[in-house]
Amino acid sequence: MQKSTVHLVKELTDLLLKFPSLVTGFERKQPQALAALLSWIAAAEQLLSSYGLVASAELAGLRSKLTAPVHRDEHRGQLRKQQLREAVEMLYPLQQCLQQTLTPYQQKLQQSAELIRHLLSVISQSGALHYDAAAGFDSFVQQLWQLIGRHDQLKAGAVQLRSWLSQQDITLLLAQEVNPADFP
């Protein structure tokens, strides 16, 4: 079963939106900055790992730089300073790793949304389907998808969408993009 690209994009975006506050924590030399960064890395690794993305290994490699000072024979005060130095140096590579992982999935969603908008425009202009508020929005979305999958001219779009996304993601994007007012 294909995993949700919509969910992955949302979760990666959420993680990236938390990143500026992590950087601010280091700028302001907040004592909990290192712990917050480790927690953020763990959440990112878990997400990427759950999707089988090898970028989780890259994050683990970067995280290992934070544990390296712990295994050196130096004074305890130096340990914290070294960890903080390593953390600050790895901030940009961490952000870049997640951003590079996110970009192709974002592009896939944008392409899918554009294709869905095109298909909806064709259906709307043809007058092949009308929105019935009594039947409900979910029913209307299902009717749209069935029409796209059965209609000879639209079927290629359905095949393309299925190759990019899971059925659940297609339905979700279709529901996000459709405006019932366009189907009087």
Image: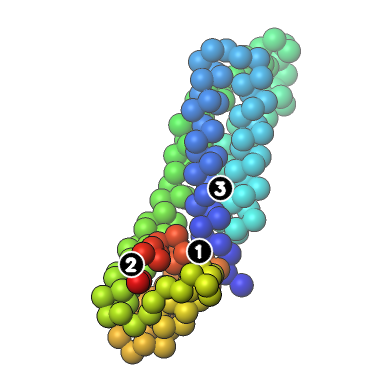
> Which numbered disc covers residue 50?
none
- Residue 28 location, x and y as percent? 54, 12
Visible residue check, residue 108: no
Dividing the picture into quadrants, the one containing residue 72 is top right
Nearest the eye: 170 or 106: 170
- Residue 97 location, x and y as percent? 48, 43
Quarter containing the C terminus: bottom left
Residue type pointed to by label 1: Leu
- Tell me the SS state at disc 3: helix
Earlier sequence position, callout 1 versus callout 3: 3
Earlier sequence position, callout 1 versus callout 2: 1
Gap between marks 1 and 3, in whole Å? Answer: 16 Å
- Residue 107 location, x and y as percent? 37, 57
Marks 1/2 in contact by CB < 8 Å: the verdict is no
Residue at x 64%, y 42% (from the top left corner): 43
Earlier sequence position, callout 2 versus callout 3: 3
- Tell me the SS state at disc 2: helix
- Tell me the SS state at disc 1: helix
User: Which residue is tagged 2?
Assistant: 182
Residue type pointed to by label 3: Glu
Disc 2 residue crowd, few under 14, some 14–19, many 20+, Cα 10 Å? some
> Which numbered disc covers residue 172?
1
Left/right placement of residue 96 relative to residue 21 reads left
Nearest the eye: 169 or 88: 169
Quarter containing the N terminus: bottom right
Marks 1/3 in contact by CB < 8 Å: the verdict is no
Nearest the eye: 12 or 57: 12
> Which numbered disc covers residue 11?
3
Q: How is the image coloured?
A: rainbow
